[in-house]
Image: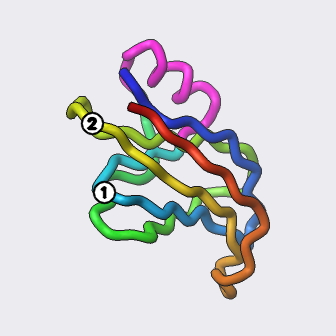
Amino acid sequence: MKYLHFQLQVKADEVIQVVLQQSAYLRILDDDNYASYRRGDQYRYHGGMASGSPAVIKPPTPGAWHLTIDLGGEDGEVKATVHIVNEADPETKKSRRWGLFG
């Protein structure tokens, strides 16, 4: 399976903002569930299909998270820009990451 992967450190007052050019599945996973996702086993995640952009996801707790972005098994290419932003002031971007797969 092709997907974008970002390792993120998120504080209590921050959210993850994802700018997409098309609909895609966004999943936030902890270490164990990310390992299961990679193996193709059952896993638990937060998120789902994002049909609008930018999409905003708040992790359930502060800390280290894995963000995956994929097309749910569909063919194609997804491009995404990922920001960690302050929940109260989304214009203040603390981190910027780029990704692409085809």
Name above or below for residue 59 compared with residue 76: below
- Residue at image x 51%, y 61%? 18
Q: Which residues are magenta?
A: 29-42
Name above or below for residue 51 compared with residue 31: below
Q: According to the image, label 1 marks what residue?
A: 22
What amino acid does circle 2 point to?
Gly
Magenta span has 10? no
- Asked if the residue at tag 1 contacts the one at tag 2, i.e. Cβ–Cβ closer than 8 Å, the answer is yes
Q: Is residue 6 left or right of residue 46?
A: right
Q: Residue furthest bottom?
A: 89
Colour logic: rainbow
Principal secondary structure, stretch drawn in magenta: helix
Q: Quadrant of the C terminus?
A: top left
The CA span between labels 2 and 1 is 10 Å
In percent of width and height, residue 97 lies at 67, 51
What amino acid does circle 1 point to?
Gln
Q: Is residue 65 left or right of residue 52?
A: right
Q: Toward which corner of the image does residue 74 lie, by quadrant?
A: top left
Q: Quadrant of the N terminus?
A: top left
Magenta span has 37? yes
Judging depth in this view, the residue of 52 and 59 nearest the camera is 52
How busy is the neighbourhood of tag 2: few (under 14 within 10 Å), some, or many (20 plus)?
few
